[in-house]
């Protein structure tokens, strides 16, 4: 499976932001006050985490990550709202780092993008007071995660490392082919 595109991320941001407002209203009617806000944050975050896991090129561990994320998010509801936001951002950044990165620096960039998205969301909420615009601002910036490369290295190290990985397999395959050819060429005596 290939990585999602920026336009797909923008579409996801649009859908989540359109879901956020009615979901927030329903949850606040059901559980008013801070608990409603927390449950809305948990639901929106889990929707995005499920999207990330379904689009992930790595297939192993998806279900485990989804279950652990759900447990962490549900457990965070007992905390203050700011801690729920931090747990949600840490889960988003961590899952993207695990599923869409192969080294530490891109993983840190995913975390930085989450912090930038949080700043944009806080700015949008302060100026508009709209939950929909707040969620839109955060997830619109999250759509840019597809531009973070899998691995960041110097160009020389990248070509040497990738060539070494590919050459290692090719060399092993060629060595096996040569060994089979020598076995076929030996006369049975």
Image (cartoon, rainbow, N blue to C red):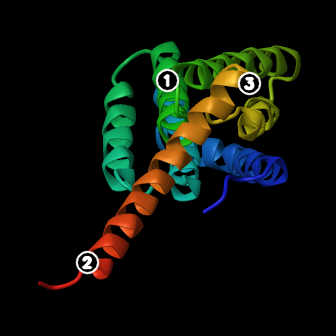
The residues tagged by marks 1 and 2 sit, at their Cα atoms, a distance apart of 61 Å
Vertical arrangement, residue 157 with respect to residue 187, above or below? above
At mark 1, the secondary structure is helix
For the residue carrying disc 1, how many other residues have a C-alpha within 10 Å: few (<14), some (14-19), or many (20+)?
A: some
Residue at the front extreme, as displayed: 189
| Residue at 56% from the left image edge and 24% from the top image edge | 107
Badge 3 density bin: few <14, some 14–19, many ≥20, Cα 10 Å: few
Seen from the viewer's position, the closer of residues 170 and 159 is: 170
Q: Mark 1, mark 3: which one is toward the viewer? A: 3
Q: Residue at x 46, y 15 (%)?
A: 83
Which residue in the rendered view is the most extreme toward the right? Answer: 127
- Look at the image and tell me in which quarter the C terminus lies: bottom left
Do labels 1 and 3 touch, CB within 8 Å?
no
Residue ID at (46%, 52%): 171
| Residue identifier under label 3 | 155
- Quarter location, residue 157: top right
Q: Which residue is mark 1?
A: 90
Q: Secondary structure at mark 3?
A: helix
Q: Nearer the viewer, residue 167 or 38?
A: 167
Q: Is residue 65 left or right of residue 55?
A: left
């Amino acid at each position: 499976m290939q990585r999602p595109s920026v336009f797909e991320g923008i579409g996801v941001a649009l859908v989540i932001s359109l879901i956020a407002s009615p979901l927030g209203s329903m949850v606040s009617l059901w559980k008013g006050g801070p608990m409603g806000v927390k449950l809305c944050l948990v639901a929106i975050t889990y929707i995005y985490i499920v999207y990330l896991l379904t689009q992930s090129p790595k297939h192993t561990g998806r279900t485990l990550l989804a279950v652990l994320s759900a447990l962490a998010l549900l457990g965070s509801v007992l905390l203050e709202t700011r801690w729920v936001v931090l747990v949600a951002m840490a889960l988003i950044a961590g899952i993207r780092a695990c599923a869409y990165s192969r080294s530490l620096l891109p993983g840190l960039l995913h975390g930085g993008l989450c912090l930038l998205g949080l700043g944009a969301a806080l700015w949008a909420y302060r100026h508009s007071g709209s939950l929909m615009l707040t969620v839109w601002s955060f997830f619109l910036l999250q759509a840019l995660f597809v531009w973070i490369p899998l691995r960041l290295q110097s160009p020389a190290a990248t070509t040497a490392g990738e060539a070494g990985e590919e050459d290692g397999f090719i060399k092993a395959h060629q060595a096996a082919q040569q060994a089979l050819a020598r076995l076929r060429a030996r006369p049975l005596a």
